[in-house]
Image (spheres, helix red, strand yellow):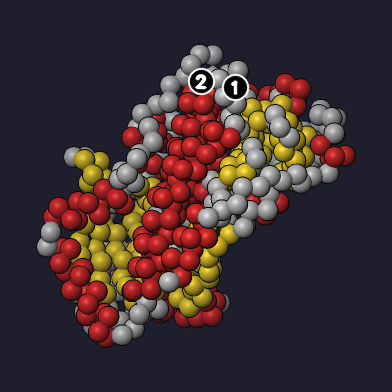
């Protein structure tokens, strides 16, 4: 019932414009302040890292947010539309490396996109292929964890359905590629904006102003841009948090990922390079906070009870943090000259490892919609361009939201009867190779109407 109401609230959205901003802020002229190159950006990239590089303080597209989605979209647009199409990325953390110590699962389709953008080859040696996956359903203290479902790890011969990579390494590669592509990188957040008929006036927190045809909110789950645009979100908190850390272990994982469904939530062991694994461990929020606050030895004991001894001795090799979990979906992905991508548009439970990949599907769809629109004479923020993007992403997003919500509710249900039914279901799936291939194809991001970039196809430059 909750999922049905979420679907109805999302689809039945009102169309309305907005005008938010401080006129005095957007009238600030450019070039009045001295701006240094952020750390980690090459000196040769100085013009790409300074607002003064923008002609008359204008940019065809301005992207707020320097995560995977923001950088990937900036690179895709610059490569496809050439040097006369200006793209700016604004984020206070531009040029700062090593801030995000987490790791992410990159499904096959987004990996194809990163390859098409010329990013993947630079990080391939740091990425661990997921060669197979096993799923169990048991209690923490069970002596044996029977395997109910296994997945082979290839979507095509020689192509794993996913890779694990540490976020910091991939963000650094995306940042470097953005500089080479000529994206203007601005170490400042968007402070305010106001939509006009032909443009969006944007004020940055460093006192500068930019006029753009399309503003993209890639600023995360707590998107200030979404809030300022008056776009409501629908959803709920699960009362759970994900404990995230990295462990080193004695024996090789052989590229195997494991997901243990425990009564409190899934406990995922995701392989990294060099005999290490990323842990995503779900607990009720109060219990997660208690566990994270434990002394190192006590935390190790709690971890070992769930991790087991199959990989030998383990050592926590990274910081441990807890992240609250919920399901949140923006009622609209667009407004006047504004598009939401990634966590700004939707947040789902990590039970299927699809949150980041959903955001990268947004990027591929929006990039293709913008490029196709520009090539037929529309501007990037034209209503037809944005409506095409929203139609493309709406059904897929809601399908994934409902699926992950249902899985979380199913596998945290402590009823013995429900547990027996779900284990029988997993066992049946395991006995039908065609059904397993369908699930692998879906997890790889290759089901449905797949944008060109996710098929590994370039959007092709129309000239310099």
Most extreme residue toward the right, as rendered? 24
Q: In the rendered view, does 323 fall on the left or right side of 406? A: right
Residue 330 image position (x, y, % from top left): 56, 55
Q: Which residue is mark 1?
A: 85
Q: Residue at x 51, y 20 (%)?
A: 376
Establish if 28 lies above or below 189: above
Give the tally of numbered discs.
2
Instruction: Count neighbours of disc 1 (C-alpha within 10 A) and say few if under 14, some if 14 to 19, many if 20 or more.
Output: some
Any part of residue 223 in sight: no
Q: Residue at x 61, y 47 (%)?
A: 15
Split into 4 quadrants, where in the image is the N terminus? bottom left
Q: Earlier in the sequence, mark 1 or mark 2?
A: 1
Tag 1 secondary structure: loop
Residue 251 image position (x, y, % from top left): 27, 62
Q: Residue at x 66, y 47 (%)?
A: 16
Q: In the rendered view, does 217 fall on the left or right side of 271? A: right
Location of residue 423 by image quarter: bottom left
Establish if 362 lies above or below 325: above
Establish if 402 lies above or below 186: below
User: Which-is-in-front pick, marks 1 and 2?
Assistant: 2
Q: CA distance from mark 1 to mark 2?
A: 15 Å
Establish if 269 lies above or below 358: below
Instruction: Count neighbours of disc 2 (C-alpha within 10 A) and say few if under 14, some if 14 to 19, many if 20 or more.
Output: few
Split into 4 quadrants, where in the image is the C terminus? top right
Labels 1 & 2 near each other (Cβ < 8 A): no
Q: Which residue is mark 2?
A: 376
């Amino acid at each position: 019932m909750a999922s049905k109401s979420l679907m109805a609230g999302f689809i039945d959205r009102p169309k309305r414009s907005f005008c938010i901003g401080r006129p005095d802020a957007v009238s600030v002229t450019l070039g009045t302040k001295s701006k240094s190159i952020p750390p980690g950006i090459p000196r040769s990239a100085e013009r790409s890292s300074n607002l003064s590089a923008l002609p008359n303080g204008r940019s065809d597209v301005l992207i707020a947010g320097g995560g995977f989605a923001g950088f990937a979209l900036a690179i895709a647009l610059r490569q496809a539309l050439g040097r006369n199409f200006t793209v700016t990325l604004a984020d206070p953390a531009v040029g700062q490396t090593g801030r995000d110590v987490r790791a992410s699962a990159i499904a096959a389709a987004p990996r194809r996109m990163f390859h098409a953008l010329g990013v993947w080859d630079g990080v391939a040696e740091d990425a661990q292929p997921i060669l197979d996956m096993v799923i169990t359903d048991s209690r923490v203290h069970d002596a044996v964890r029977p395997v109910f479902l296994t997945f082979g790890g290839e979507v095509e011969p020689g192509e794993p359905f996913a890779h694990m990579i540490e976020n910091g390494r991939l963000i650094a590669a995306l940042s470097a590629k953005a500089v080479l592509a000529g994206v203007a990188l601005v170490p400042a957040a968007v402070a305010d904006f106001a939509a006009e008929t032909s443009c969006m006036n944007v004020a940055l927190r460093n006192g500068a102003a930019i006029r753009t045809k399309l503003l993209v909110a890639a600023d995360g789950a707590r998107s200030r841009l979404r809030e300022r645009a008056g776009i409501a979100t629908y959803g709920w908190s699960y009362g759970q948090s994900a404990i995230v850390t990295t462990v080193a272990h004695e024996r090789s994982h052989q590229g195997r990922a494991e997901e243990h469904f425990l009564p409190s939530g899934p406990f995922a062991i995701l392989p990294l390079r060099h005999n290490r694994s990323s842990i995503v461990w779900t607990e009720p929020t109060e219990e997660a906070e208690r566990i994270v606050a434990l002394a190192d030895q006590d935390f190790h004991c709690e971890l070992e009870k769930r991790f087991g001894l199959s990989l030998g001795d383990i050592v926590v090799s990274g910081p441990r943090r807890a992240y609250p979990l919920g399901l949140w979906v923006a009622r609209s992905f667009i407004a006047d000259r504004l598009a939401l991508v990634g966590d700004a548009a939707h947040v789902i439970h990590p039970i299927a490892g699809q949150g980041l990949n959903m955001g990268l599907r947004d990027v591929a769809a929006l990039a293709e919609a913008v490029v196709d629109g520009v090539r037929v004479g529309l501007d990037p923020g034209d209503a037809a361009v944005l409506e095409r993007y929203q139609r493309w992403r709406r059904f897929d997003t809601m399908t994934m939201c409902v699926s992950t919500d249902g899985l979380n509710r199913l596998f945290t249900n402590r009823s013995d009867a429900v547990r027996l039914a779900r284990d029988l279901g997993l066992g049946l799936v395991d006995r039908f190779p065609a059904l397993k291939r369908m699930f692998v194809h879906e997890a790889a991001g290759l089901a449905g109407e797949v944008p060109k970039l996710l098929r590994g196809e370039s959007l092709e430059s129309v000239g310099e």
